[in-house]
Image: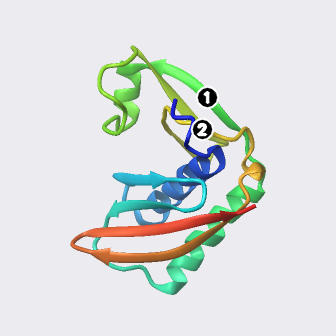
Amino acid sequence: MNKSIDPGMHTAEHILNGTMDQLFNCGRCFSAHIERKKSKCDYHFSRSLSSEELTKIESRVNRIISSNMKVADTYITKTEAEKQFNLSRLPEGGSTEIRIVSVGDYDACPCIGPHVTETSEIGIFRITTSDFKDGILRIRFKLKR
């Protein structure tokens, strides 16, 4: 587990990914850079987002954060995980069991990083910028704590 990743920011990434997939059916980000002060997620996408869409994303993420959902780990077999999840971002090799991180009933995905225990520990989510180029939508965000 990478101790330099901020648990609140990392959990916010999970909520953002769940939100993007639910609103736009685009899947989870294929690339992310998560830091304490600011972070970014890259998505395969076909266009830029409008300011209204960005506001909707930000509002939904903050609604989930403020709902104080539990963040929990469960372990399932790698075979079962392959049926339910994309495992491409997990390190090669590893265990026969895969850790699944769930944010209440809102989002679940395989993950090796640190997380908060309840969403209310995250703070306020803000999208700072977004841009689109060559089929890639980048969303940059930060947390106010």
The answer to which image quadrant residue 87 occupies is: top left
Callout 1 environment at 10 Å: few (<14), some (14 to 19), or many (20+)? Answer: some
- Asked whether the residues under the numbered discs 2 and 1 touch, taking CB atoms below 8 Å apart as contact, a structural biologist would say yes
Q: Residue furthest left?
A: 134
Count the numbered circles shown.
2
Can residue 28 be seen in this snapshot?
Answer: no
In the image as oriented, which residue stretches furthest toward the bottom? 51
Residue under pointer 1: 73
**In front of the other: 140 or 101:** 140
Q: With 72 as the anchor, is 139 left or right in this view?
A: left
Left or right placement of residue 145 versus residue 11 in this view: right
**In the figure, 35 relative to 129: above or below?**
above
Quarter location, residue 124: bottom right
Residue assigned mark 2: 102
At mark 1, the secondary structure is strand
Relative height, residue 101 to residue 76 (above, below):
below
Q: Find numbered disc 2 in the image and state the secondary structure of the residue it sits on.
A: strand
* Residue type, label 2: Ser
Give the image location of residue 63, x and y in percent.
Answer: 71, 63
96, 77: nearer the viewer: 96
